[in-house]
Image: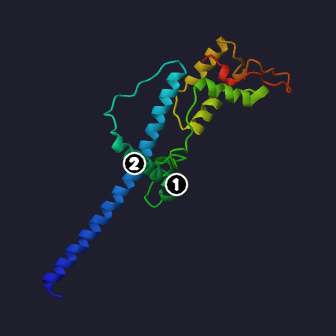
Amino acid sequence: MSDAEKAIVDGLTSKVKELTEEREDVRRSLLENALRDAQIERDINGCIAAARAFEQEIELPKNPPVPPNLQGHLNAFVAGRNQIAASAPALKTYFGLTDGDIEPETLSGESAVPEMPRIADIILDRLKVAGKEGSKASEIRRYISRTYKADIHEKTVGMTLYRLKQDETVRNEGHKWFLASTEAKNPGGETPGSINSAKT
């Protein structure tokens, strides 16, 4: 191999090394950005759901409408993001990420996170499950965070509980909350009515 040829090969080798390092950085960024994008979407939905607890609707900022011929591509884009985010636990060590860089649970598809009902309906459902044991507002908020991946305001559950109390739908004993129809001293009592009968 001549000196000229060796210089060309050395240049190509150096370029491959440079591109490989850049590719690692780009892929790490893709993983981090996919996680952040998914978290932003969950937080937006959490804010909207929290506003509904106060019978208010938050309108999303108006974006250019998606042309019908691009809707399928956008859906595929979001599905791809979910697949990247779902790979985070397996790839975190490979890309040098820590547990603090990723969510405890990541999306594995569009149906991975159930649609979030009204806060009031969730509260009534959790109190129905709790029965005579009751539940604290903090426990309900943690349930919402785990189940719906929604970062609602820390006071939303408490304020909704007080509104339901004014409607005589729930009652409290200290920090514990119960359905108004649940008798703490009657373990065998059933809770009549449906959570859908709530006024909020």
Sequence-first disc among 2 and 1: 2
The extreme bottom residue here reads 1
- Scheme of colours in the image: rainbow
Q: Secondary structure at mark 2?
A: helix
Q: Nearer the viewer, residue 37 or 78?
A: 78
Mark 1 is surrounded, within 10 Å at the Cα level, by few (under 14), some (14 to 19) or many (20 or more) other residues, namely some
Q: Is residue 156 above or below residue 98?
A: above
Query: Where residue 146 sits: x, y (%)?
Result: 59, 39
Q: Secondary structure at mark 1?
A: helix
- Residues under labels 2 and 1: Cα distance? 21 Å
- Name which quarter of the figure residue 18 lies in: bottom left
Query: Where residue 165 sits: x, y (%)?
Result: 66, 14
Q: Residue at x 46, y 40 (%)?
A: 39
Q: Residue at x 52, y 22 (%)?
A: 52
Q: Amino acid at mark 2?
A: Phe
Q: Nearer the viewer, mark 2 or mark 1?
A: 2
Q: Residue at x 71, y 23 (%)?
A: 194
Can the viewer see residue 135 in this picture?
no
Q: Is residue 90 above or below residue 9?
A: above
Q: Amino acid at mark 1?
A: Pro
Mark identifier at residue 89: 1
The residue beneath circle 2 is 77
Query: Where residue 117 sits: x, y (%)?
Result: 58, 30
The answer to whether 49 appears left or right of 81 in the picture is right
